[in-house]
Amino acid sequence: MTIGLFYGTQTGNTESAAAEIQRIFGAGLVDLHDVAKADISDFAGYDCLIIGCPTWNIGELQSDWEGLFPELDDVDFSGKKVAYFGCGDQVGYADNFLDAIGILEAKITERGGKTVGYWSTDGYDFDESRAVQGNKFVGLALDDTNQADLTEQRLRKWVALLRVEFGV
């Protein structure tokens, strides 16, 4: 089984995290797709997806995801397991930390996707987020601005969780 990892990046942090996720999973398990170059039909080739998006400006999607967002209405995500990760700044943007993955998760769930890879909010300090359901983020929360020293450990733990949830 191959996993499709679709990411958008503005400053390079999300792209770096995507490459690290691919490396941790191991050779041949994860195909990387920069959404700036991806076609909406590319989602169809995978039963398991990882979606990566930084929150940009004040709670907005990164520009490449923003451009692709309306086209997600044309994708049937039924039967697909979908994991999310996002990059954000919990201190500077405490009122909308990781909103982007919350926006994407809501749309993809509406289109039939099954969310996996929920991540605890413990260890984070923010006020609000559209990416929180109950006491968990809908996916992995990365903050290289304030907690860069935790990124590698979080990525390893999350990939181990996804291995179980994806069955690989």
Image (cartoon, rainbow, N blue to C red):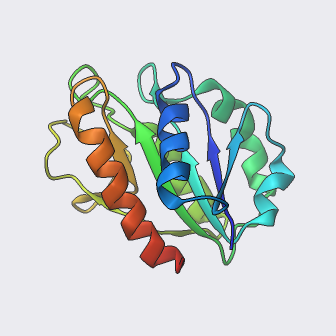
Does the image show residue 75?
A: yes
> How far across and how far down the image is residue 114, in percent?
55, 72
Q: Is residue 161 shown left or right of residue 22?
A: left
Front residue (pair 22, 67): 22
Residue at (65% x, 72% y) in the render: 80
Classify residue 27 by image quadrant.
Answer: bottom right
Classify residue 62 by image quadrant.
Answer: top right
> How far across and how far down the image is residue 132, in percent?
32, 53
Above or below, 150 against 121 in this view is above
Above or below, 91 against 87 in this view is above
Quadrant occupied by the N terminus: bottom right
Residue at (56% x, 21% y) in the render: 10
Above or below, 34 against 112 in this view is above
Above or below, 28 against 149 in this view is below
Residue at (25% x, 63% y) in the render: 134
Residue at (27% x, 30% y) in the render: 148
> How far across and how far down the image is residue 57, in percent?
45, 19
Does the image show residue 129?
A: no
- Total numbered labels placed on residues in the image: 0
Q: Is residue 23 shown left or right of residue 161?
A: right
Q: Is residue 86 shown left or right of residue 81?
A: left
Quadrant occupied by the C terminus: bottom right
Q: Is residue 93 shown left or right of residue 53?
A: left
> How far across and how far down the image is residue 129, in percent?
31, 42
Classify residue 142 by image quadrant.
Answer: top left
